[in-house]
Amino acid sequence: MGLTSDFSISKKYRPDVLIFLLLIPVISAFNYYLTYSNIQWNGFLALTFAIDTTQGYLAWLIVRRIIFWLDRVLPFGPNPTKRILIQVAITTFAGLAFIILTTELVSWIAKGRPAIPEFYTMDVFIIGIWFLVINGIYTGLFYYHTLQEIQAQKSRLEPEFKGIPVKTGNQELLISGSEVAALKIDEEYVLLFTLTGKKYFLDESLDYWEKNLPESGFFRLNRQTIIHRQILLGFKKLDHGKLEAQVDSKFNFDLELGISRAKAPSFRTWFMPNR
């Protein structure tokens, strides 16, 4: 159960293993550059660099395990601030504690004395900043994969929309969704307007197109109008909870843009899904 759970969690952070296998030696080298003004290229440098890099890998594995554990007991959820703060605090403390303890151990074994004071005044501070960077990478990977999952789910739920077929003269055309500005009822006809201002008559009713157009891009404002998100600038509030959609003035299609009080909440959610 634990291995299966860790495997499913690890998918949220791919390719973290590859990233840190490459990044940690770079971090070690950069730390040497910041710490030492005169670097001597010899066997001792290679040995200390290997030890520091190994410490870095082990500290990263500790941080990784803590993040996986937090995913099980304290998911990000709708308000991730608490999770991020706790994650940064725990991983930074655990990672620094490991680096300090192993550095002291190596110093006592190799030199018979504690680590030099500069390790605590400079190195620990720099390493602490790197733990913030590591947390930032993991948080970014998590939200990247979450966004990918949401988009994939939307694609599965919404059938592929190839466009709206229209007739003009003896031609039959397919107007892609990205070309559509709005649909409106004009007497007994349904008209389609494109972004370039072209107008086409449709055989199907507005009710039909309300059901068959992708919800992510189109919204039926009222009995007369379906509008594409790409021509919307925003909306303004009217009396009694009603709204009025606002479109760019260049799309002068004489559209009915009023939104009833009953439909206003669903329009707000569609237009600003993250609020």
Image: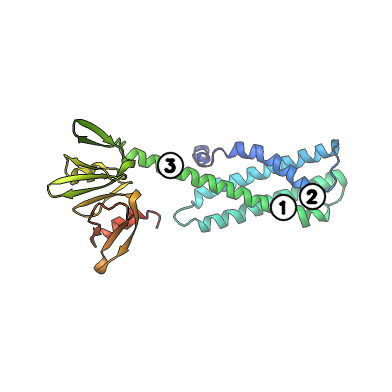
Q: What is the x, y in percent for residue 48?
A: 80, 41
Q: Say whether marks 1 and 2 touch (CB < 8 Å).
A: yes
Say which residue appears at 33% left-offset and 51% top-offset: 231
Q: Which amino acid does label 1 sit on?
A: Ile
Residue under circle 2? 35
Q: What residue type is labelled 2?
A: Thr
* Distance between the alpha carbons at the discs numbered 1 and 2: 9 Å
Q: Which of 190 and 71 is in front in this view?
A: 190
Q: Which of 23 and 73 is in front in this view?
A: 23
Pointer 3 local density, CA inside 10 Å: few below 14, some 14–19, many at least 20: few
Tell whether 98 sits left or right of 212.
Answer: right
| Residue 195, numbered circle | none
Say which residue appears at 49% left-offset and 47% top-offset: 143
Residue under circle 1? 126
Extreme residue toward the bottom, this view:
239
Q: What is the x, y in percent for residue 101?
A: 75, 50
Say which residue appears at 16% left-offset and 44% top-offset: 205
Q: Quadrant of the rendered structure where residue 193 is? A: top left
Q: What element carries label 2?
A: helix
In the image, is residue 234 above or below residue 23? below
Q: Which of 23 and 178 is in front in this view?
A: 178
Pointer 1 local density, CA inside 10 Å: few below 14, some 14–19, many at least 20: some
Q: Which of marks 1 and 2 is nearer the N terminus?
A: 2
Tell whether 172 sits left or right of 103.
Answer: left
Residue under circle 3? 149
Say which residue appears at 30% left-offset and 51% top-offset: 251
Q: How is the image coloured?
A: rainbow
Q: Which amino acid does label 3 sit on?
A: Glu
